[in-house]
Image: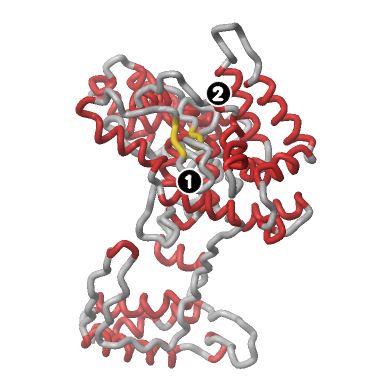
Amino acid sequence: MSAAAGLSCLVFFLLPLLAPDEMVHAWAGPSSLTDAPDPHGWRTPVDCARANELCAAEPSCSSRYRTLRQCVAGRDRNTMLANKECQAALEVLQESPLYDCHCKRGMKKELLCLQIYWSIHLGLTAGEEFYEASPYEPVTSRLSDIFRLASIVSGMDPAAAAAKSNHCLDAAKACNLNDGCKRLRSGYISVCNREVSPTEPCNRRKCQKALRQFFDRVPSEYTYRLLFCSCKDQACAERRRQTIVPHCSYEDKEPPNCLDLRSQCRLDPLCRSRLADFHTNCQASFRSPTSCPRDNYQACLGSYAGLIGLDVTPNYVDSSATSLTVSPSCSCRGSGNMEDECEKFLKDFTENPCLRNAIQAFGNGTDINFSPKSPPLPPITLPPKLEKSPSLPDNISDSNTIYDTSVITTCTSIQKSLTTALTPEQTFERANGSGGRPSFRGTLSALPFLLMKAAL
């Protein structure tokens, strides 16, 4: 057996012994960017506003950034980016903190942060992509956190709330009991219902701005209950549909083409960011039980709520209590040879199992909480051949994986040598329930001997 194969076996057996932080260092090594000394925060991931400040303090970075912005701002963008000077600017900026920067939803300089993000990433893509990566930091919280807070606010547990008949009315009452929620909700209702002239029933831009302030500033335990309340009758469903005052913020006499609406949205950094965030967190994933990326309902619902008050504002298409069909106010009429792309965009709302499951989960007061399984403790005994794993959802199957029995036999012998090399203080103290973990330094001291033995 080769030394490389022996090292592979050692890594396989050593990884369960490592703590998460030790695993990162074991793989990344001392050359990792995150491990390198960096007193100025140059390599540390930061928000794009802070990254811009760091770049401005470096003459080389700041000059290249100005060059790139001029390249992207050109009328013929592809021609500008083909310029050698523009390409050189991109190469330098990919090593700067601007390349990996992100933004936080609701941060103080959110719009500035997003403008900086797109000024970099529009230069990194050859053209418009159907799906764009979200500029926002990932959402790690779960719906269960919202359920807990909502039950505290309403003074009842979720099971008791589920027994009531009109959850959308209950949500409005709960909002009125909170000063901030009541004030901002009254504000957007007033603006959206204010007639401007006999021919203009309301000021849509002011209405949408007031809606954005409501959904950005009011905690989600209130806003989600208004948007995603479950209904058993038409009266409740109509109240849910009227949450965003659709005659002003949403409805159009002649719905525009969906691709035109998307193009219009992408001209605005905020709208473009929220749409990219929606696609990142709600794009149907048929490899997960919930159909959502990372099985995170909270991220999908938050991204959906983030679209309200923008050009692609979604809403319920009717007052049906049994249907959860939502859509922006647009159609695919007049799409020509782009009809398939238009339908794909529209179906991300109207036929999206991730979004539908997330709305149902919140309305029913349920959530799926997947806790990662702990890795098996050594010693590990592997069969010479793995059985075929069960089929994945929607008939997506894993292929069989076959291991070389000679490698497994050698790995098993190395495992025994590794167990012998560890001192009693370096083994798990499971008999007395101490829950300690082995010292990795002691294990490393045995590596040279084990590698030589594996090579023989």
Q: Amino acid at mark 2?
A: His
- The residue located at (62%, 35%) in the rendering is 215
The image's mark for residue 311 is none
Q: Residues within 10 Å of mark 1 (few under 14, many from 20)?
A: few
Taking depth in this image into account, of 125 and 410 the one nearest to the observer is 125
Counting from the top left corner in percent of width and height, residue 323 is at 48, 46
In the rendered image, which residue does mark 2 sit on?
Answer: 247
Q: Amino acid at mark 1?
A: Ser
In front here: 377 or 345? 345
The quadrant the N terminus occupies is bottom left
Closest to the observer: 405 or 438? 405
Residue drawn at (70%, 25%), measured in percent from left and top?
187
Distance from Cα at disc 1 to Cα at disc 2: 21 Å
Task: Give the percent coordinates (x, y) of residue 168.
Answer: 65, 43
- On screen, 29 above or below 224? below
| Quarter of the figure that contains the C terminus | bottom left
Q: Secondary structure at mark 2?
A: helix
Label 1 or label 2, whichever comes before in sequence order: 2
Image side of residue 184 versus residue 240, left or right: right
Q: Which label is found at residue 323? A: 1
Q: Is residue 58 visible?
A: no
Which quadrant of the structure image shows residue 197?
Answer: top right
Contact? badges 1 and 2 (CB < 8 Å) = no
Q: Secondary structure at mark 1?
A: loop
* Side (left or right) of 220 relative to 126: right
